[in-house]
Image: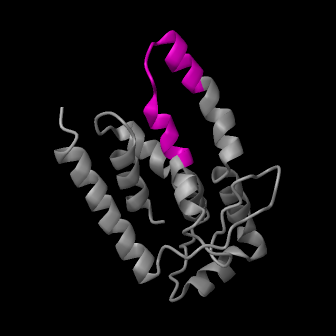
């Protein structure tokens, strides 16, 4: 799923008022990988190439010097890794600050939404890394039926939250 959709789903589905923390955690699994990759390319004085197809993009990431990006992606898209990060923070906020930190659930939400919207050819989501290499071969988010349906659902959910569940 694209980064904007992850940000919007985090705002639409998680309880509470819109907050930058929801957006930040909602896009974190992708930003941690791709911002790091772009930064390293910039430091090396290189530009990331433009791709005409997803296949060209994946060929670039499968080069020996770029495989680390695919490896990092597995870890930033792991429910197990995020659980290890989130649980202690959640416990702290919940028990010591007497608040429920809903924003923490934006990253796992991101991963759960990526599982069916990524296929085996383009950043498949190995959501049980490092325990398992299992990946689900979904329908890629860039296919028009998935992309358009996704944004229609986002609009519907935001509309429902704004007008049906007003306080």
Is 12 positioned to the left or the right of 61 in the image? Answer: left
Magenta run includes residue 138: no
Which stretch did the figure color magenta?
89-108
Residue 67 lies left or right of residue 28; in this view the side is right
Q: Position of residue 29 (x, y in %)?
A: 56, 52
| Position above or below: 82 against 77 | above
Image coordinates of residue 161 in percent, x first then y, are 25, 45
Quadrant in which the C terminus appears: top left
Q: Quick check: is 95 in the magenta stretch?
A: yes
Residue at 74%, 60% in the rendered image: 71
Residue visible at 68% across and 68% down in the picture: 136
Q: Is residue 70 visible?
A: yes
Residue that appears at 50% across and 82% down: 50
> Residue 78 location, x and y as percent?
68, 50
Asked if 79 appears above or below 136 in the picture, the reply is: above
Q: Residue 97 in the image: state x and y as whole percent.
A: 46, 13
Extreme residue in the front direction? 164
Query: Closest to the observer: 56 or 42?
Result: 56
């Amino acid at each position: 799923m694209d980064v904007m959709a992850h940000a919007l789903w985090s705002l639409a589905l998680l309880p509470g008022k819109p907050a930058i923390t929801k957006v930040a955690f909602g896009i974190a699994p992708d930003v941690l990988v791709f911002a790091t990759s772009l930064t390293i390319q910039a430091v090396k004085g290189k530009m990331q190439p433009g791709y005409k197809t997803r296949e060209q993009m994946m060929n670039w990431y499968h080069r020996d010097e770029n495989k680390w990006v695919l490896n990092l992606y597995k870890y930033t898209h792991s429910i197990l890794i995020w659980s290890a990060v989130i649980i202690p923070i959640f416990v702290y906020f919940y028990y010591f600050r007497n608040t429920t930190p809903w924003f923490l659930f934006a990253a796992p939400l991101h991963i759960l939404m990526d599982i069916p919207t990524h296929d085996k050819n383009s950043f498949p989501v190995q959501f049980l890394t490092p325990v398992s290499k299992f990946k689900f071969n979904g329908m890629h988010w860039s296919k028009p039926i998935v992309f358009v349906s996704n944004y229609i659902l986002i609009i519907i959910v935001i509309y429902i939250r704004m007008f049906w569940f007003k306080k």
